[in-house]
Amino acid sequence: MRKQLNLKVGFTCNNNCKFCYLTEDEKKLGDRTTEEIKHDLFLYREHGVVDVAFSGGEPTIRNDIFELVSHAKHLGYNERGIVSNGRMFYYLDFCFKLVRAGANSFIITLVGHRAEIHDYLVRVDGAFNQVIAGIKNLKKLNQRVIINSVITKQNYRFLPQFVDLLKNLGVNQIQLAFPLITGNAYENRYEIVPLKSEIIPYLYEALDLASKYGILIMVEAYPFCFLRGYERFHYRLYIPQGYVTLRNVAGKLTEPCGEPIKGPMCKECKYDLVCDGPWKEYTDIFGWDEFKPVPGKKVKNVGEIIRNHKFIKQKN
């Protein structure tokens, strides 16, 4: 069984995103010490964890980030990822030092194809230009860049243009996620959270474009019933068998925020056995009217879906 560690190094951040899912209770935990993080890196490596992703908060604003990444490399972690808002990557020297320390995967949040959308959602003027420059810097260093984007009312109509931008930047992978409605996202829910159904035409066009360009793209937090004919883009199909993500918060393993839920109609859907359903936080606000079961023989595992679709090979 291959295991990945999502290691939260703390909750300090230089953005204040409208869609952030972190709760106030989590933010009050503050940042962890260098020694605490090193202890966890050692502990989970001893227990067979092979990959680590440093997340937050914002890990790149820590003074010890180079030391932590180097330590993870020394302990033998294969993938040493940085989950970031991308602003510090604006500085080429910072990127170079991070790569030299051992970082080899960069998961960057970008939520708009134009500055006015991205900057509005992260609430930092100039953030978009910093992130775009940062992606270019990382690609100059031949690094693997994955883009995480949260779909909101402000950006969903521009998803095809967003894919065009990322294609031109040479990113390796795109992950489109529906917002988890906790933390800031809950406070701003009526402003930023769209209906799942109204996104679909733009989402399908974006998926078609990425497929045309040969870019690996996947969709998170979307039940299969909204991806009819596009099931091959569901994120669950790209998780290696036996792959486990351990989410470490303040030295303790926790479950992800949010609670998946099933509605009464889900039992009638062919994907019931392989689908987690929507977040409860979503149905508490919008109800179940959008959810229509897909008729057909029950799919018992995602392998059945994989065998029925042609998949895009990830770029190196």
Image (tube, rainbow, N blue to C red):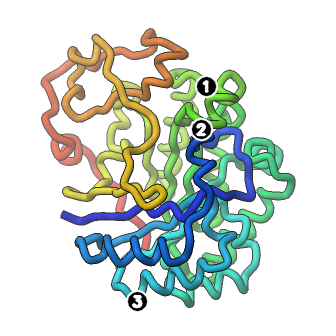
Circles 2 and 1: CB atoms closer than 8 Å: yes
Name which of mark 2 and mark 1 comes first in the sequence. 2
Mark 1 neighbour density, 10 Å: few (under 14) some (14–19) many (20 or more):
some
Question: Residue 226, relative to residue 293: is it above or below?
Answer: below
Within the image, what quadrant is residue 117 found in? top right
Dot label at residue 56: none
Q: Amino acid at mark 3?
A: His
Across and down, in percent, residue 115 comes to: 81, 51
Report if residue 167 is visible in the image: no
Q: Residue at x 70, y 39 (%)?
A: 18
Question: Residue 115, relative to residue 194: is it above or below?
Answer: below
Name which of mark 2 and mark 3 comes first in the sequence. 3
Q: Secondary structure at mark 3?
A: helix
Within the image, what quadrant is residue 246 found in? bottom left
Task: Write down the residue under mark 1.
Answer: 194
Dot label at residue 74: 3
Task: Write down the residue under mark 2.
Answer: 151
